[in-house]
Image (cartoon, rainbow, N blue to C red):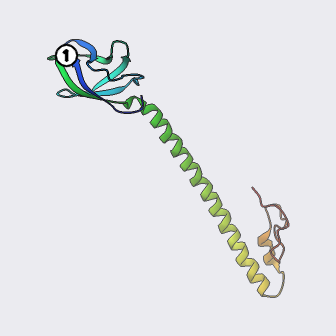
Amino acid sequence: MSTVREFPSVTLTNNSNLVQINTNDSNFSVVPGSVIFIVGDRPRVVTSGDTVNRTLTLAIAYTGNDIVEKSATLIPLGQNDALLSAITSLTEAQNGLGGAYNEFLSLYQYLEARVVALEACHSCGGATDSDTLLRDINGDLLFDIEGNQLKALPQ
């Protein structure tokens, strides 16, 4: 059950864990852990539903005065595990994107500094030792003085 259900008339008797649905309203595919709100009573956890007998089974037996022909609302809160899983997945994805963004930003800042050095070197009339700023960890040039890529960027 993935939607809220309204029952115009239910009955709940003392020392019973069965809520009787007094109408032909469906209780098909009740999610265990759903909560029923009966007028005049506190919320109660539902563990299952019987479509033949039109009853809902409560997790804990009701004690108190009989509740007769009152309206009730059934809310599918039993799907919290699926919601928590979805929120966890979204959080992990967000954290992964944050890490990728930080790596991209670092690479951008690295390359931006090299472009500034290259432009300064180029404006002074030619290659100087400043081109060493454009080398990878092995000392191989990544770009020539004109800015042409000579080698793939390190991963």
Image location (x, y in percent) of residue 89: 53, 41
- Locate the N terminus and report the quarter of the image it occupies: top left
- Locate the C terminus and report the quarter of the image it occupies: bottom right
Of residues 16 and 131, which is closer to you in this image? 16
Q: Is residue 2 above or below residue 124?
A: above
Amino acid type of disc 1?
Thr
Of residues 108 and 23, which is closer to you in this image? 23
- Horizontally, residue 99 falls left or right of residue 67, namely right
Residue at figure coordinates x 58%, y 52% from the top left: 97
> In which quadrant of the rendered view does residue 29 lie?
top left
Label 1: how many residues lie within 10 Å, few (<14), some (14-19) or many (20+)? Answer: few
Question: Where does label 1 land, which residue?
Answer: 63
Image location (x, y in percent) of residue 121: 77, 82
> In which quadrant of the rendered view does residue 49 lie?
top left
Image location (x, y in percent) of residue 102: 60, 58
Question: How many numbered circles are shown?
Answer: 1
Of residues 137 and 66, which is closer to you in this image? 66
Query: For the residue labelled by badge 1, is the local secondary structure a helix, a strand or a loop?
Result: loop
Image location (x, y in percent) of residue 98: 57, 54
Q: Is residue 151 above or below residue 131?
A: above
- Horizontally, residue 40 falls left or right of residue 145, namely left
**Farthest residue toward the left?**
65
> In which quadrant of the rendered view does residue 20 lie?
top left
Residue at figure coordinates x 19%, y 16% from the top left: 63
Of residues 140 and 87, which is closer to you in this image? 87
Residue at figure coordinates x 45%, y 36% from the top left: 83
